[in-house]
């Protein structure tokens, strides 16, 4: 029998306890991973290179306040801009739904095409969309979810605008960070609402990342002290702003995670000390046989490390499997679209488990180091 | 929520089952068939494992209770809003006041309805209002968040007696003044009295703070309706609030508005409208449920571990008990009681850990208006009871198998064991 089998045999000799420990570490690890992933999904918008090239200009008062359509002429004169399109959130409900998980935006198709840097057309043609005022461009995710195809009609009931839409699907796009949305003609929206001369926001593409700051300053300056002051920011900054409105999600989930880790530590420490207390006499015998403290410590450490590691492996693998199989979009009604367990998160959980194994071994090791051989041999329990 | 249909049955089962179990335990104890004192002493003697088990369960329970308290807070603020006599009218199809648009002609039609009650000055109690959203910088933490500004009329304030001025004075129409909810002022910069709110090219001066007494109005700031319309450049209003003469008149008005296709409006009782505005609480409830389940599984295994160890360490004592004449059932029961007692201590400690958060104000984005909603953690006695009940369930589940094992120990060999 070598040292490794000795440790393994010791760890597994109370099979039930080993199993319970492994499972509780696994469950906690899975929980930790899920929490960290949730936090990441809620606080980090999907990355896209073009997001730093695209700028959203909204009314300085708030996103809900419209902008005058006449601003377009001024925007067109600002150098560094490739294209500007109106971009108005319609907020309609699809069919009979009360909560619709995809957004609809009114755009100017001729000006919007250059803005779709990452996207490409999957079915139908963009020209068809651009020509027909009653048509729309639909994201591939929504198409799949509802089983729609090019040529189908989409009925949308307005919740923000007092009008309803009945759109023909002209083309399907995919490849953007959010392949769920519907885009339709701003002219149609103007027609239906009696042309109030307003847009929700301006959405624009700049030539390069270098000029984007300059363009933002120019836009903000151009409308200063007018009846509708503008706040322009990169798409990414805009998304971060939206997230910050959720409040302190990071703190909430962070504190829950801490509690989970703390509970995990408690459980492991108590298990390890139980395992060692049971074996006090044997360890005393080992000491009597001439094993040094350091060696005893490494036995205990290896055992606790091994149990924690096994639990972590199960928990990390299990949660990765779970979240890659579940259709969370369906489950949460569109609240969460993506739920990706990243390697970074898995590594975090692994490190936590490794530290756990070390911390849990400290207490029992000190107890063993302190005991005298005679005292240990006397222990009955 | 479909879960609510089953809730009474679940509670009934819990109460009946718990009652039966208690009766069973007490009758066994009275007949001297349960060595309870032995168990309680054990909990004290093995203080190290007791503390770790109790703390573990306490943390699980406190997370569960706090998340539920968050959801309760959102629900309470909605449930606490509105007067049962009032009727709120919004545009058909809009889900929230903030997304509703209605014209002055709607107001003109409605204000001549005979069913509307009148005040002492013989004015009809009807108010046409506008909701605007203004982005403001937070005091704590980075960034800005949307806040609701309600353009309101004198009648509208009469219709909301629960809102009371606590500091400064009410706004005066035409003077670019605004009165802000005290709780909102605690969360956003520049909302102290004398501060200014920038609304486009205009500036509004904060002249007072009001208290909405835990209602949804605590997330709002109030100013004059027509002034708001001009500042925010809006032709249309958002909603109409009115008070019918009596209950019959109320049903009458709702039916009348519903029937009139020209109006395209939706009328419902103010309290009903607000009780539906709890969508924001749903994700938090889901999170509480998921976390509660996952963490309790972990806690059950931990409790099981402790109880197994405690059974293994007491083999000889259990043998002695059996020799003294305690039946197997008594042994099972006493270990279950011990586990439940341990866990209940954890539950109580967990509730105590959570308790300081009661009443602490916090906020999140409302998913209907996209504006900040301010609410408080609400740790109610019912919620604490739930937390303790939850911990007892953990304890019972965790100690069931170890208890059965204890009862099955063969008496003679148990006595022989070291």
Image: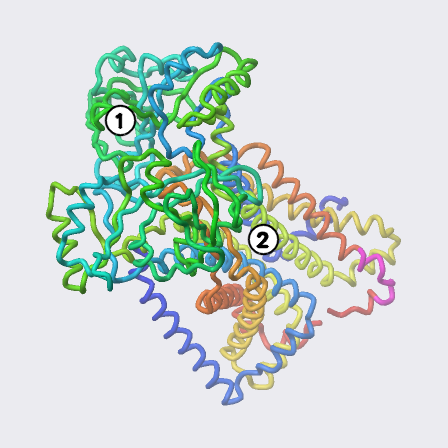
Residue B404, placed above or below residue A214: below
Local secondary structure at mark 2: helix
- The answer to whether any part of residue B82 appears in the image is yes
Q: Residues within 10 Å of mark 2 (few under 14, many from 20)?
A: some
Q: Which residue lies at the image location 48% right of the left edge and 81% below the top edge?
A: B25
Q: Position of residue B98 (x, y in %)?
A: 33, 42
Q: Inspect the magenta stretch and tell me whether residue A369 lies in it.
A: yes
Q: Inspect the magenta stretch and tell me whether residue B211 lies in it.
A: no
Q: Which residue is mark 2?
A: A19
What secondary structure is the stretch in magenta mostly built from? Answer: helix
Give the magenta part as a residue range. Answer: A366-375
Q: Position of residue B56 (x, y in %)?
A: 60, 60
Local secondary structure at mark 1: loop
Cα gap from disc 2 to disc 1, whole angstroms? 68 Å
Disc on the earlier residue, 2 or 1: 2
Q: Nearer the viewer, residue A378 or B340?
A: B340
* Marking on residue B409: none
Q: Which residue is mark 1?
A: A196
Residue B400, placed above or below residue B156: below
Q: Is residue A380 left or right of residue A220?
A: right
Marks 1 and 2: in contact by CB < 8 Å? Answer: no
* Chain name for mark 1: A
- The answer to whether any part of residue A35 appears in the image is no
Disc number lying in front (2 or 1): 1
Q: Position of residue A274 (x, y in %)?
A: 69, 61
Q: Position of residue A138 (x, y in %)?
A: 30, 23
Q: Nearer the viewer, residue A76 or A70?
A: A70
Q: Nearer the viewer, residue A94 or A212?
A: A212
């Amino acid at each position: 029998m070598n040292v490794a089998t000795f440790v393994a045999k010791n760890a597994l000799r109370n099979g039930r306890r080993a199993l319970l420990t492994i499972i509780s570490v696994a469950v906690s690890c899975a929980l930790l991973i899920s929490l960290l992933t949730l936090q990441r999904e809620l606080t980090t918008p999907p990355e896209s290179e073009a997001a730093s090239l695209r700028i959203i200009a909204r009314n300085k008062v708030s996103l809900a306040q419209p902008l005058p359509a006449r601003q377009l002429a001024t925007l067109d004169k600002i150098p560094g801009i490739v294209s500007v399109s109106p971009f108005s959130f319609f907020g309609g409900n699809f069919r009979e739904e009360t909560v619709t998980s995809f957004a609809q935006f009114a755009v100017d198709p001729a000006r919007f095409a250059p803005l779709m840097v990452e996207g490409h057309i999957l079915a139908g043609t963009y020209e068809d969309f651009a020509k027909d005022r009653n048509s729309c461009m639909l994201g591939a995710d929504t198409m799949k979810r509802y089983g729609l195809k090019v040529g189908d009609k989409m009925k949308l009931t307005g919740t923000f605008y007092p009008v309803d839409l009945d759109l023909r699907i002209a083309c399907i796009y995919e490849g953007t960070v959010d392949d769920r949305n519907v885009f339709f003609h701003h002219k149609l929206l103007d027609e239906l609402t009696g042309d109030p001369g307003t847009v929700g926001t301006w959405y624009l593409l700049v030539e390069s990342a270098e000029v984007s700051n300059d363009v933002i300053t120019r836009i903000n300056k151009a409308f200063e002290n007018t009846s509708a002051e503008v706040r322009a920011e990169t798409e990414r900054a805009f998304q971060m702003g939206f997230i910050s409105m959720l409040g302190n999600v990071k703190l909430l989930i962070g504190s829950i995670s801490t509690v989970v880790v703390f509970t995990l530590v408690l459980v492991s420490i108590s298990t390890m000390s139980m395992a060692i207390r049971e074996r006090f006499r044997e360890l005393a015998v080992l000491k009597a046989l001439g094993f040094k403290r350091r060696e005893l410590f490494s036995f205990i450490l290896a055992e606790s490390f091994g149990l924690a590691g096994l639990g972590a492996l199960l928990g990390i693998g299990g949660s990765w499997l779970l979240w890659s199989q579940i259709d969370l979009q369906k489950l949460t009604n569109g609240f969460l679209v993506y739920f990706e367990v990243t390697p970074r998160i898995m590594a975090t959980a692994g490190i936590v488990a490794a530290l756990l194994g070390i911390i849990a071994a400290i207490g029992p090791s000190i107890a063993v180091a302190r005991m005298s051989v005679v005292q240990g041999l006397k222990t009955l329990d | 929520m479909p879960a609510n249909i089953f809730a009474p049955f679940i509670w009934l089962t819990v109460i009946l089952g718990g009652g039966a179990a208690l009766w069973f335990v007490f009758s066994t104890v009275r007949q001297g068939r349960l060595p309870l004192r032995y168990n309680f002493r054990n909990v004290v003697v093995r203080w190290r494992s007791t503390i770790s088990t109790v703390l573990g369960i306490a943390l699980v329970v406190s997370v569960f209770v706090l998340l539920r308290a968050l959801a309760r807070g959102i629900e309470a603020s909605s449930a606490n809003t509105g007067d049962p006599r009032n009727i709120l009218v919004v545009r058909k199809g809009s889900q929230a006041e903030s997304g509703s648009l209605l014209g002055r002609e709607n107001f003109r039609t409605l204000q001549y309805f005979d069913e509307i009650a009148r005040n002492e000055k013989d004015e009809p109690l009807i108010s046409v209002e506008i909701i605007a959203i203004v982005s403001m910088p937070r005091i704590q933490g980075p960034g800005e968040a949307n806040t609701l500004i309600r353009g309101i009329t004198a009648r509208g304030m009469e219709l909301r007696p629960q809102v009371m001025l606590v500091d400064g004075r009410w706004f005066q129409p035409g003077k670019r003044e605004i009165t802000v909810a005290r709780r909102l002022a605690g969360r956003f910069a520049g909302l102290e009295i004398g501060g200014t709110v920038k609304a486009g090219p205009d500036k509004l001066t904060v002249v007072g703070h009001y208290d909405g007494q835990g209602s949804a109005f605590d997330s709002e700031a109030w100013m004059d309706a027509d002034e708001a319309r001009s500042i925010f450049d809006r032709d249309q209003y958002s909603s109409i609030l009115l008070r019918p003469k009596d209950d019959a008149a109320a049903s009458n008005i709702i039916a009348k508005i519903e029937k009139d296709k020209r109006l395209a409006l939706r009328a419902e009782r103010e309290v009903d409208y607000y009780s539906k505005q709890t969508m924001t609480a749903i994700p938090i409830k889901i999170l509480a449920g998921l976390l509660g389940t996952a963490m309790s599984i972990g806690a059950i295994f931990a409790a099981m571990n402790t109880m197994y160890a405690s059974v293994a360490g007491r083999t000889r004592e259990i043998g002695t008990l059996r020799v003294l004449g305690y039946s197997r059932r008594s042994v099972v029961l006493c270990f279950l009681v011990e586990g439940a007692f341990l866990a209940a201590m954890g539950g109580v400690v967990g509730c105590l850990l959570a308790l300081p958060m009661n009443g602490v104000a916090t906020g999140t984005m409302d998913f209907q208006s996209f504006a900040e909603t301010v609410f408080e953690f609400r740790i109610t006695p019912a919620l604490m009871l739930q937390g303790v009940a939850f911990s007892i369930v953990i304890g019972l589940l965790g100690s069931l198998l170890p208890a059965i094992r204890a009862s099955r120990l063969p008496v003679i060999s148990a006595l022989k064991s070291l």
